[in-house]
């Protein structure tokens, strides 16, 4: 079972809210100093799912991302977790791409990789959350897609997938090759082993440019984007919390109940 | 130039899903600005034609009903094909879906296929200089972005649950209902629906609850959800959980509150051992009153809470539960 996983490197989503900074003038999020970027939360679930399938069924995992030189660190982590090969898409032509532009470049890279059974992505990125790239990628490659999986079972000629719904689980059969997306319902990603880190450090990560992919520069980048950003700011919450106290915590708890009753909230 | 607004309405078993009403409300407003008609498309198995009438009462001028046994269960392939056929038939300037496991699964494909713009998880929609403009929380809610479609062609947007008011029901409103034939090419099937297994909520459903009691990482273990269940029983509340608690395996995924879980809007939201990460507050934000119980007085949850108690929930919750029970008896 050969798997291609597309990931995104993002700024650490778990930094304290006070360290989250926005440059409103430039309409940019200012990355926190001294906090390295990480693999987008659900993309790590996708990597883990791919490794578990490989452990069960054999095969090869190739990881792809688009980004600057720092993105190599995230690819190295994927290799250290257990992926076999990694590719970095890097070209000034890609700068300012919207989710559709990214999907076009990723689709070209997946075609260049060649044979695969499953294309795997995280459901949604932790930064701009376009919620678009995986399905646009499936559309570009004319693949069937099953999103927000919580279980995958390989069967003859295809997969049985359990999809996490608002109120339950949907079971669908899909043929391969196909695109799958996962989020935190699926698994808890492993930490790389020491041996894995050593193996990863010896692996080369090729850089592919737009021309290597046969991507028309006019179909990616800021010029091809169909959405424009017009404003970016941090939301302001003016609420004032009233701390309820008492001689003991039990008394504070009773005072809280009395206050909610007085406010007719309970 | 096309002016019509098309919405992808949804069924919830034998009735219209609540999001259909939210879509009709905002769709009606946008159609008023573009000067076009509001058209809804509804897909499903038996009974879809009948339910289509309800969309007229919610403000649609026209409803396209696609009724077929093949659409009883959801598959991305067929739902995309049929929805795209409706988009082709109407040629709208704006196409809206809701942020559900169907809407967000179908819309990006149609937008990409048609060279349209696509704005996901919008909390406000308007028309600016003839283009669709949207407000989208990003970075898990830590920042708010305003975006605008750059294309003359179709603009597609996906609306966040509870961000838009429900449409007013106008009984006796008239409109046209047409049916869309569903063709399934047997050789082209790459997916098949097997079944839906519903997870029955214990007690009150999260989305319908007037009071929600939610637990996070601070609870320290699955067994400690029993503190919250005891309180929920007294308050007739639903129990929720943060992603941290779900990831730790302490609570089922269906009760996760947050950006990728459920968005709830109860009158009272009691957050226990929840730090208040932005991703969580996306789901708890619409609550009218938030009460937080946390050992860390610096936890961000207190910035969003009306009332807070700093301390160990193992002491606070039992005493609070007992007092509530006493007060509610009178």
Image: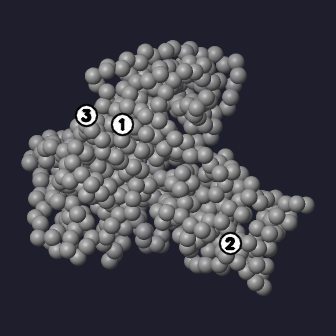
Decide: is B1 above or below A145.
above
Q: Is residue B62 left or right of residue A78?
A: right
Classify residue B313 by image quadrant.
bottom right
Chain bearing tag 2 is B
* Disc assigned to residue A142: 3
Image quarter in which the C terminus of chain B is found: bottom right
Q: Which of the marked residues, 3 or 1, is nearer the chain's N terminus?
A: 3
Whole-Å distance between the Cαs marked 3 and 2? Answer: 52 Å
Q: In front here: B4 or A149?
A: A149
Residue B244: x and y, percent? 49, 65
Can residue B300 be seen in this snapshot? no
**Quick one: SS at disc 2?**
strand
Can residue B191 be seen in this snapshot? yes
Q: In front here: B150 or A247?
A: A247
Identify the residue at horizontal 51%, vertical 23% (top origin). Answer: B45
Q: Tell me the colour scheme of the image.
A: one colour
Are the residues under marks 2 and 1 on the same chain? no
Residue A188: x and y, percent? 39, 63
Whole-Å distance between the Cαs marked 3 and 1? Answer: 17 Å
Are the residues under marks 3 and 1 on the same chain? yes
Identify the residue at horizontal 71%, vertical 63% (top origin). Answer: B230
**Quick one: SS at disc 1?**
strand
The residue carrying mark 1 is A173
* Disc assigned to residue B308: 2
């Amino acid at each position: 079972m050969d798997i291609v996983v597309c990931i995104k490197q993002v700024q650490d989503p778990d930094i304290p809210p006070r360290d989250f900074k926005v440059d409103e003038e430039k309409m940019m999020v200012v990355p926190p100093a001294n906090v390295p970027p990480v693999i987008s939360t659900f993309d790590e679930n996708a990597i883990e799912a791919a490794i578990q399938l490989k452990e069960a069924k054999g095969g090869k995992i190739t990881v792809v991302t688009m980004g600057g030189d720092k993105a190599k660190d995230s690819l190295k982590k994927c290799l250290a977790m257990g992926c076999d090969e990694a590719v970095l898409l890097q070209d000034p032509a890609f700068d300012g791409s919207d989710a559709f532009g990214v999907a076009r470049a990723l689709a070209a890279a997946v075609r260049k990789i060649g044979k695969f059974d499953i294309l795997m992505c995280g459901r949604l990125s932790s930064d701009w959350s376009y919620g678009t790239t995986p399905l646009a990628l499936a559309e570009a490659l004319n693949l069937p897609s099953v999103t927000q999986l919580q279980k995958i079972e390989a069967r003859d000629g295809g997969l049985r997938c359990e999809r996490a719904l608002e109120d339950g689980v949907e079971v669908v059969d899909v043929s391969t090759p196909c695109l799958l997306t996962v989020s935190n319902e699926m698994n808890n990603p492993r930490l790389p082993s020491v041996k894995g880190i050593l193996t990863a450090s010896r692996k080369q990560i090729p850089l592919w440019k737009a021309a290597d992919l046969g991507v028309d520069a006019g179909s990616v980048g800021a010029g091809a984007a169909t959405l424009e950003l017009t404003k970016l700011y941090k939301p302001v919450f003016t609420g004032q919390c009233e701390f309820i106290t008492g001689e003991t915590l039990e008394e504070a708890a009773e005072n809280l109940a009395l206050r909610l009753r007085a406010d007719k909230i309970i | 130039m096309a002016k019509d607004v098309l919405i992808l309405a949804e069924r919830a078993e034998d009735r219209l899903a609540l999001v259909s009403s939210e879509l009709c409300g905002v769709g009606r407003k946008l159609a008023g600005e573009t000067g076009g008609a509001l058209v809804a498309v509804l897909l499903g198995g038996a009974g879809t034609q009948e339910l289509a009438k309800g969309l007229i009462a919610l403000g649609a001028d026209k409803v396209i009903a696609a009724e077929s046994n093949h659409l009883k269960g959801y598959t991305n392939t067929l739902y995309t094909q049929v929805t795209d056929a409706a988009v082709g038939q109407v040629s709208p300037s704006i196409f809206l879906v809701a942020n559900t496991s169907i809407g967000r699964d179908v819309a990006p494909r149609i937008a990409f296929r048609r060279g349209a713009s696509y704005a996901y998880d919008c909390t406000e929609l308007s028309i600016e200089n003839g283009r669709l403009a949207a407000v989208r929380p990003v970075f898990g809610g830590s920042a708010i972005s305003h975006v605008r479609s750059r294309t003359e062609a179709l603009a597609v947007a996906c609306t966040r649950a509870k961000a838009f008011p429900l449409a007013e029901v106008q009984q006796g409103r008239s409109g046209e209902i047409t049916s869309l034939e569903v063709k399934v090419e047997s050789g082209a099937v790459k997916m098949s629906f097997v079944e839906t297994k519903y997870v029955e909520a214990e007690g009150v459903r999260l989305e319908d609850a007037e009071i929600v009691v939610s637990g996070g990482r601070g609870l320290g273990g699955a067994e400690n959800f029993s503190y919250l269940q005891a309180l929920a029983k007294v308050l007739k509340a639903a129990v929720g959980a943060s992603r941290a608690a779900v990831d730790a395996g302490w609570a089922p995924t269906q009760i996760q509150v947050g950006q990728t879980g459920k968005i709830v809007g109860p009158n009272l939201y009691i957050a226990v051992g929840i730090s208040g990460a932005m991703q969580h507050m996306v789901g708890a934000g619409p609550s009218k009153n938030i009460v937080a119980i946390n050992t860390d007085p610096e936890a961000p949850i207190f910035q969003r809470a009306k009332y807070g108690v700093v301390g160990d929930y193992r002491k606070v919750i039992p005493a609070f539960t007992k007092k509530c029970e006493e007060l509610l008896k009178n």
